[in-house]
Amino acid sequence: MGRVLAIDYGRKRCGIAVTDPLRISANGLPTVRTCDLMAFLCDYCGREAVDIIVVGEPKTVRGEDSESARYIAPFLRQLAKVMPEMKVERFDERFTSVIAHRAMIDAGLSKTRRQDKGLADKTAAVIILTDWLNSNSIL
C-alpha cells in the first residue's frame, strides 16, 4: 500500500502533507512554491510509493466552487498529463485555513510564527489529509 499525498493548492504556494506508508497519520512536508509544485510531485512520487493525490477543493459556505477553484483546474489538467496513472481525488477544504489558524493558536505559537503563511498552508494540507483519511476509514 502506497502513501496518500494531499495538496492545499494556492496561487503562490502549496501546502503538502503525506501519510505514513500504513496510512495511519498525516504529516506536513515543506511548503512548495506553486510554480515548483509539478517538479516536486514528480521527484517525490519517484522516490516514494504514492497511490493517491488528494487535492483540496475550495468551496463556498453554500457548497459552490469558490473563486480560487478556477486556478486549480489548469494544475489538475497538467497533473493528468504528467502522471496519467496517478489516482487524483478532490476533497472539500472548506474552513481548513480557519481551522489551521485555530490549531496554531491552540498549540501556543507566537503571533509572528502564526503569520508564517507557509506554516498555515502546511497545517491546512495536514487537515485536508486527516479529514480525507477519516472519511475513507474502514471502521
Image (spheres, grey):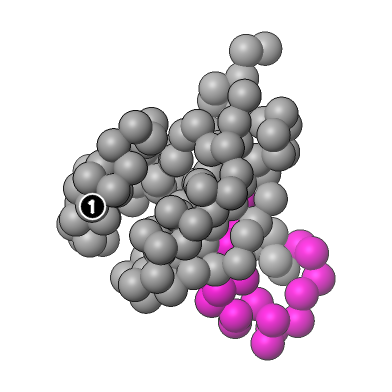
In the image, farthest residue toward the bottom? 112
Crowding at dot 1, Cα within 10 Å, few <14 / some 14-19 / many 20+, comes out as: few
- From the image, give the main secondary structure of the stretch colored magenta: helix
Say left or right for 49 vs 73. Answer: right
The residue that disc 1 covers is 78
Taking the spot 72% from the left edge, 68% from the top edge, the residue there is 105
Q: Which residues are magenta?
A: 106-128
Say left or right for 33 vs 22. Answer: left
In the image, farthest residue toward the right? 108
Taking the spot 45% from the left edge, 40% from the top edge, the residue there is 53
Q: Secondary structure at mark 1?
A: helix
Question: Residue 19, image x and y in percent?
Answer: 65, 40
**Magenta stretch holds residue 122:** yes
Taking the spot 23% from the left edge, 52% from the top edge, the residue there is 78
The answer to whether one can see residue 71 in this image is yes
Taking the spot 62% from the left edge, 24% from the top edge, the residue there is 1
Question: Residue 12, image x and y in percent?
Answer: 37, 75
In which quadrant is the C terminus drawn?
A: top right
Occupied quadrant, residue 49: top right
Depth check: give the residue in front, 135 or 95.
135
Question: Residue 67, image x and y in percent?
Answer: 21, 60
Position of residue 83 relative to residue 87, above or below, is below
Say left or right for 3 vs 59. Answer: right
